[in-house]
Image (tube, rainbow, N blue to C red):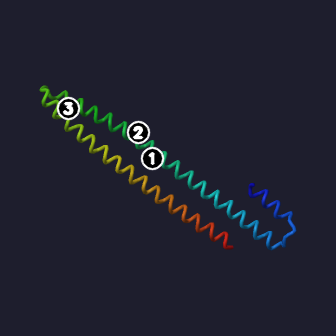
Amino acid sequence: MNSTKLINIIQSSSMPLEKKADLISQIQAQGISKNIRQVALTAINAHIKQLEAQAVEADFKLRATLQQVASDLVAEFTGEEEKQEQLNIIVKEADRRMVAAEDDFNEEQDANEQILNAVELNLAVATAKSQAM
């Protein structure tokens, strides 16, 4: 049952006016808190998806750049051993950069989770305060 129906039922009941007002205030406060929480969660989820998309895009760009650098470096060397050695160095550097990028992305996600936890705590406090009134 939605809050509007509950408010209509309460208003049409025979309970004292103070009790009606108190119940209606509680219902409205809960509805507002749920709406605020939903908006905050939606915004945070959208931000996380945006960060994930940026990470994927950065990964593709990094791979393309590393492939181009590898091709350029390989073209400079003529011997097979030298080519293999250079490729190994490039692969190690690419792996190092990928790990660093992944660490940065994970740190950003951890920060977003902390923000979400703080928002949820603030909403819980606001809900408790509104219910206490």
Q: Give the quarter of the image for residue 8.
A: bottom right
Task: Name the mark on residue 51.
Answer: 1
Quarter the C terminus occupies:
bottom right
Quadrant for residue 52, please give it.
top left
Label 1: element kind: helix
Count every numbered label the image shows and give the total. Answer: 3
Residue at position x 23%, y 40% in the image: 92
Q: Which residue corresponds to the image point at 57% horizontal and 51% vertical from the top-left? A: 42
Between disc 3 and disc 2, whose residue precedes?
A: 2
Type of the residue with mark 2? Glu
For image coordinates 48% across by 49% down, the residue present is 48
Which numbered disc, 1 or 3, marks the residue that appears first in the sequence?
A: 1
Which numbered dot is residue 122?
none
Taking 106 as reference, is 22 left or right? Answer: right
State the mark number for residue 57: 2
Kindly identify which residue carries mark 3: 73
* Disc 2 residue crowd, few under 14, some 14–19, many 20+, Cα 10 Å: few
Type of amino acid under label 3: Leu
Q: Secondary structure at mark 2?
A: helix
Image quadrant occupied by the N terminus:
bottom right
Q: Is 67 situated left or right of 110 in this image?
A: left
Vertical arrangement, residue 33 with respect to residue 81, above or below? below
Among the two numbered marks 2 and 1 on one chain, the one whose residue lies closer to the N terminus: 1
Asked whether 14 or 56 is in front, the reply is: 14
Task: Name above or below for residue 33 compared with residue 79.
Answer: below
- Classify mark 1: residues with Cα within 10 Å, few (<14), some (14-19) or many (20+): some
